[in-house]
Image (tube, grey):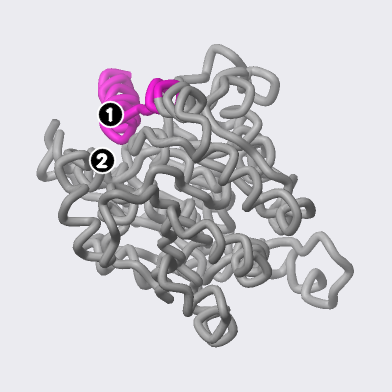
Amino acid sequence: MKNLKVLIAGGGTGGHVYPAIAIADAIKKQVPDAEILFAGAEGKLEMEKVPMAGYRIEGLPVVGFQRRLTWKNLLFPFKLMAGMLKARKIVKAFRPDVAVGVGGYASGPAVKSAAAMGVPAVLQEQNAFPGVTNKMLAASAKKICVAYEGMERFFPKEKLVLTGNPVRTAFFEGLSEKKEEALRQFGLDPKKQTVFIFGGSLGAKTLNDAMVDGAGMIGSNSQVQWIWQTGRFYEATALQSETAKLPNVTARTFIDRMDLAYAAADVIVGRAGALSIAELCLVGKPAVLVPSPNVAEDHQTKNALALVQKNAARMVADAAAGKELLKTVFDLLGNEKERQELSANIAGLAKPRSAEEIAEVVLSLAKAQAKA
């Protein structure tokens, strides 16, 4: 397809930004000379990560509406108006064939402006419970690409395409062949079971607290070894803890080679963000999910439950993690049959062609628009 132009809008968090970049890469793979422009929120993650991935981005002066009482909400209507005006200017200047909204602050003004000018729009919803922006934009969209079944509760059924969440699939290929390298990388004993626990690059307080408070249980079960990513926010306290000094614990602030951590693990413990879950499905190993309570609409709990209901993961509530998390992990390590069932079921939910399928939806709309 010649002279294809695609506007991709949204961001704010890695859970929005990285899928957006994966979609852009998939479009470029199918149409190498496609011109792709991103619209993001000024000062947010996308303004750094998108140019690093090789794409152009325009920033919008938008902010989110805070759910608590704060003076910042007084700025919201003014920022929204300024964002809409700039989004209209961007759409008029770029003249995209298709607009893609991935959620987040910038998605609303950009997709709304594009749709108002007759540009067909595609939404990508990562979570089992949709964000406010995508729910508001649903009427403007031609197609809505979703990661979970049952999303007709929120969106018109005829618009839905079940694609899964786009992640870096090449990153997860051949994990079983990497196990020996992974054990060497982390200095682990091949005869022992391994748990990988992580809370993202910044860390998760609940997971770190469970590790710090569980020094006795972890130390007395020396037949199990741990890879513990503490995250940058908690490195000082976590790395100085008794747990971090145990011989069966390898504690790191950040892990660059996540593929090796996944390859080494027999059980994985983490949050239930959409991107993490998409990765865990590709990894295909038993997981214990501890949904973060600090997210809009408690969507991580809904993401986790979508797996639990298919016997594809175990879940521990954030408030109960102090008492139950380590016990749940040790129970799972002692139950090979359940581990095999969880592995098979979570792997069955993997969608390795997600980015390509979303790109195909985008291209089909562009072709239909060209014929119109």
Disc assigned to residue 294: none
353 in magenta: yes
Q: Nearer the viewer, residue 36 or 221?
A: 221
**Would you say the residues marked 2 and 1 are in contact, meaning their CB atoms lie under 8 Å apart?**
yes
> Alpha-carbon distance for marks 2 and 1?
8 Å
- Circle 1 packing at 10 Å, graded few (<14), some (14-19), many (20+), is some
Res. 118 visible in picture: no
Element type where label 1 sits in the image: loop
Identify the residue at horizontal 74%, vertical 61% (top origin).
65
| Residue 251 visible, this orientation | yes
Main SS of the magenta part reads helix
In the image, 324 versus 334, the foreground residue is 334
Q: Position of residue 225 (x, y in %)?
A: 42, 58
Q: Determine the image quadrant of residue 236.
A: bottom right
Q: Type of residue at label 2?
A: Thr
> Is residue 170 positioned above or below 320 on the image?
above
Residue at mark 2:
169
33 or 104: which is nearer to us? Answer: 104
| Residue 220, quarter of picture | bottom right
Magenta region: 344-372
In this view, which residue lies farthest toward the right? Answer: 69
**Residue 53 belongs to magenta span:** no
Measured from the top left, where is residue 317 in percent x and y?
73, 46
For residue 353, the mark is 1
Q: Classify 195 as above or below 116.
A: below
